[in-house]
Image (spheres, rainbow, N blue to C red):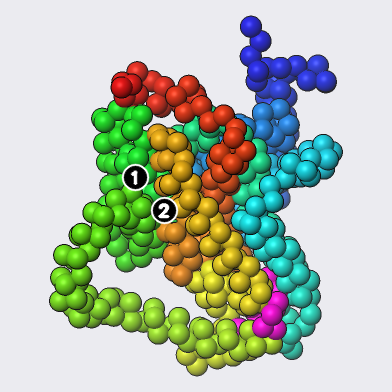
Amino acid sequence: MTRPWLDVSASGLPSITRAHWIGVGAIAVGIAAGFVLPPGAYLAFVAMLVLLAGAAVGLVLQLDRPSVALPVLLGTAVAFPVEFRGPAGVMMGSSLPLSAAICGLWILRSWLARDAAAFDRSRVVVAAVTFLGLTIVSFAMGQVPWFPSPGAPLPAQIVELGLFSLSVCLFLVAGQHIRRLSQLQWLTWVFIIAGTFTVLVQTVPGLALIGRYTSRPGSVGSVFWTWFVAITVAQALANRQLRMPFRLALLAVAGVALYHGLFQVQSWASGWAPSLVAVGAIVIVRWPRLVFGLGLVAVPLALALAGDIIAALLVEEQYSLYTRQEAWRVLWQIVERSPLFGTGLANYYYYSENFPILGWYVPFISHNNYQDLLVQTGLIGLLAFCWFGLEAVWMTFRLSLRAPSGFATAYALGTFGGAIGSLASGMLGDWIIPFYYNGGVLGFRSSLLFWVFLGGALALRRMLTRSAPVHVRHSVDPVASRPWALAPSR
């Protein structure tokens, strides 16, 4: 019996063999270059080679097994990223070239197949495409000299445009390529397994050495913790096809992730606040009456303790709030130059030097996705993103109410909580779309989860609205299909 991943292509070589040849060739060239290049040039050459090899592997996966490409992207981004210092000292990662290969091949295949008639035209897709189009307009506006001093270098602007474009494209790719519930299940469980490894590496002190080479804290952003907690909690609470021990294990892993944020990195609000928002959103949708009853009891207690809580928060975050207010005062003067379409991508980092902040003329960043969007893409670009966010939340909320019981309902709940938590995290940093001079290219490793999982929700909606078979009982669930994980049918 011929295995599908060993199908012979037109070139006469199996796809897995082509991938092996790519890896062997890259290693051979890298070793040979080590004998002829000086150390500095050799490191830059190896960085370029890794990027090209990652893009080539993405090409092979996207051409031969499109449904495998996204799980591979998530698994490597979450647990085993390839990170290195590229030219000009900029940290690079494997997630960006692999995503570029996946999105590029998707665009090429769609164009060659003339498959525009099958393209999803729902409101959330229109909002995403509109946001991307306005981003391109803002990139063009960024070439206008808005201030006497120059803006960001053109390569930085192009990379920022790439981060915007790949984010939206991953959402569309996931929405179009995922056609069966089994594909969505594999994507989810690969993320949970890889995420569990990353959570343990980040939390258990004895595993810190492994974390130096795999799950580096600097690139494990808020979006990862938000989506890991949201997905695991939703599967534990709503997927009744899983046996109780496995559901409890999922809750335990989610608890470890929350413990890491609340106790180990307590001062980093982005590590725990959006996760709690996500869990709260899931619980409200799952048990609205229980939450309402508890709220009647909790509100008087919260009002009684409100003064102490606010005072404690002000002591911890007073300087941060003060600097953010000062940053907004400066940024607003930049917004006034081009309020509708912004001053271009990545430019405001340099334009901010024209105005003093706390008496200093220095470049700075806003640490807020919404302020970033307002300055870079203007009021229209910010409104387009908010439109997309509202449509995504509404889509996942409706899915949570009408999806078939089991994995589908749990996935819809998880994406609903993850979307709300991620949108909340945008107030604390550039987590949803990384800013080149802050989260940068490495931040894309975490932010892509927001776009891929929402794309999965879009695919689930298409399955339901087009009456596609959502084989919940007989689908290939890599966890629920095991005897030790599947609850007995009633």
**Secondary structure category for the residue under label 2:** helix
Could you tell me which residue is drawn at 72 percent across and 45 percent down? Answer: 119
Could you tell me which residue is drawn at 53 percent across and 31 percent down? Answer: 470
- Does the CB distance between marks 2 and 1 fall below 8 Å? yes
Q: Is residue 350 magenta?
A: yes
Q: Is residue 206 magenta?
A: no
Could you tell me which residue is drawn at 20 percent across and 60 percent down? Answer: 294
Res 216 label:
none
213 or 350, which lies in front? 350
191 or 475, which lies in front? 475
Q: Which residue is mark 2?
A: 417
Relative to 65, is 431 above or below? below
**Secondary structure category for the residue under label 1:** helix
462 or 191, which lies in front? 462
Q: Does any portion of residue 201 appear in the rendered image?
A: no
At which x and y percent is residue 27? 67, 32
At which x and y percent is residue 210? 40, 41
Could you tell me which residue is drawn at 54 percent across and 61 percent down? Answer: 389
First to last magenta residue range: 338-353
Q: Which residue is mark 1?
A: 233
**If you read the primary sequence from the N terminus, does the residue marked by circle 2 or circle 1 appear first?**
1
In the image, 114: left or right of 392?
right
Mark 2 surroundings: few (<14), some (14-19) or many (≥20) residues within 10 A: many
The residue type indicated by label 2 comes to Gly
At which x and y percent is residue 21? 72, 25
86 or 466, which lies in front? 466
